[in-house]
Amino acid sequence: MTVEQSIREKLNAAFSPEAVQVVNESHKHAGHAGSPGTGESHFAVRVVSGAFAGKSRLERHRMVNNVLADELAGKIHALAVTALSSADAEKKTA
């Protein structure tokens, strides 16, 4: 299983999201200090879930980081997180 697949599966299992996007941005960081050169080290995720309702941005990021703790401890060098409640997502599209 790729790191990208693992991220997607864990986010789906933890948050039952309405929407989840996982974008591998590793190619943008090839040769960059700290990049292991695996092609799977830099990711951006966008998760829309009711689980984030009433939570601060920091709390949401911590929730995502906790779910992906194993990956962050080794395989992932950088992770950009956008975690939105359903209401937040509706506001952004309106």
Image (tube, grey):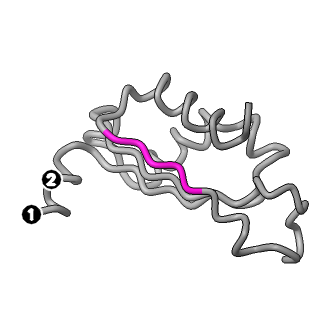
Q: Quadrant where the N terminus lies?
A: top right
Under mark 1, the amino acid is: Ala
Q: In this image, 20 relative to 36: left or right?
A: left
Estimate how packed mark 2 is, as few (under 14), some (14 to 19) or many (20 or more) residues with alpha carbons within 10 Å.
few
Residue ID at (56%, 61%): 80
Of residue 53 and residue 27, the one placed in the foreground of this image is 27
Residue 82 screen position, x and y as percent? 43, 56
Residue ID at (72%, 69%): 27
Estimate how packed mark 1 is, as few (under 14), some (14 to 19) or many (20 or more) residues with alpha carbons within 10 Å.
few
The residue that disc 1 covers is 94
The residue that disc 2 covers is 90
Reply yes or no: does residue 48 show up in magenta.
no
In this view, which residue lies farthest toward the top?
13
- Tag 1, which secondary structure? loop
| Residue 51 picture quarter | top left
Q: In this image, 88 relative to 12: left or right?
A: left
Residue 94 screen position, x and y as percent? 9, 63
Magenta residues (range): 19-23
Where 91 sits versus 68, above or below?
A: below
Give yes or no for contact between labels 2 and 1 (Cβ–Cβ under 8 Å). Answer: yes
Residue 84 screen position, x and y as percent? 32, 50
Which dot marks residue 8?
none
Of residue 61 and residue 30, the one placed in the foreground of this image is 30
Where 46 sits versus 35, above or below?
A: above
Residue 64 screen position, x and y as percent? 53, 41
Residue ID at (72%, 64%): 26
Magenta region's main secondary structure?
strand
